[in-house]
Image: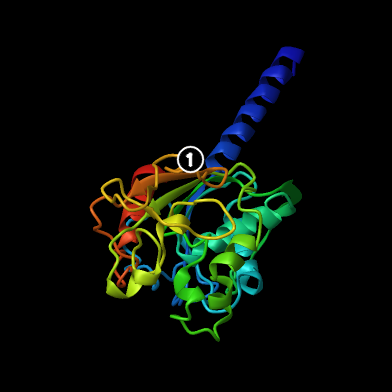
Amino acid sequence: MTKLMRVVAYLFFVSLTAISTIASATNYSLWINGRNGSGVVGDYTSFTYWGPSSTAAGVNKKAVNWDGYNSISSQNGKIRDALDCFCTGSNWCYVATHSAGDLMMGYSLANYGGSTRMKKNAVANSSGQCANSDGTSQVGWNIKWVRAASGAGGGSELSDAGAWTTTEPLVQDLKTTTARAMYNHNDTHNVWFYMSAGARGTFYSGILPGQDDEAVAYHSSGGVSGSSGGAYCNPSDWFCNDLTLGAANNEGGRAKWSYHSVTFRDDKEAYNHYSNGNWEGIISVVRAAMVSNAT
């Protein structure tokens, strides 16, 4: 074989390797539930919390189930298992959360987003864990963005008031001052959180300040910063400051957490908190966004 032939053969081999690497890269859509999780923990095909598993919800959708009862810290390993499985190596993830799932994802990134992770093969066992792919590691996860439906990263006054069962460890975590002090909400490791805030409240949600979706107020679902919640509303409401769209400060000057942007504000008060086992409520807004953008 001549020198020229060896060079051509080498370049051909390199090109095949590159094509193989590109072909093996996969995008996944991870769905992280909130309180009262009903999916099978460790089973990434169990969408009971959300609705029919046949419903489109982003490319290669996976249900990242945790019990929705115990504390964020005790359950967070389930989320890290999923992020390791599907968001390392050449694979990338889009993440959707609901309610306390936002608190869970924020906690994951703030505390572990800069940690060393082993690259995994995206083939999960019954516990939801994947084997190492090639023995190499990386820092953090490959996450394109997070979309939060009624994010409870700022807690809920329903927890403060004892409207939920106070013996639940998660309910203790969802107290507004506790949730806001649990981790550095500004530290997302440059991952954007796109917030969708529902406003179809009801008579018993009067203890929630400003606009709410029956369970979470705008100060939380809109990613508003601070050590405690405040009253934020739609522009049509003259009695409290507006929750602004985008990442800009809210009316009155209060900033949103870093890398948090409101992409949907329920100006028509049409969406409540609940999926009703059929991808309904504010979840429907995020599902539509995942179908359009998680490709």
What residue sits right under mark 1 in the picture?
Answer: 249
Residue at left 57%, top 53%? 226
- Residue 55 visible in the shown view: no
| Outermost residue to the front | 239
Residue at left 43%, top 39%? 246
Residue 290 location in percent, x, y? 38, 49
Is 27 positioned to the left or the right of 292 in the image?
right
Residue 204 location in percent, x, y? 32, 75
Rendered position, 20 above or below 196: above
Residue 166 location in percent, x, y? 53, 84
- Residue 253 visible in the shown view: yes
Is 12 positioned to the left or the right of 116 in the image?
left
Residue 178, by quadrant, is bottom right
Q: Amino acid at mark 1?
A: Asn
Question: Which quadrant is home to the C terminus?
Answer: top left
Rendered position, 166 above or below 249: below
Residue at left 60%, top 46%? 142
> Of 266 and 60, which appears nearest the observer?
266
Residue at left 63%, top 34%? 17
> Of 6 and 199, which appears nearest the observer?
199
Label 1 crowd bin: few (<14), some (14–19), many (20+), radius 10 Å: some
Q: Is label 1 in a helix, a strand or a loop?
A: loop
> Of 288 and 130, which appears nearest the observer?
288
Residue 4, by quadrant, is top right
How many marks on residues? 1
Residue 93 location in percent, x, y? 53, 49
> Of 33 and 44, which appears nearest the observer?
33
Question: Which quadrant is home to the N terminus?
Answer: top right
* Colour logic: rainbow
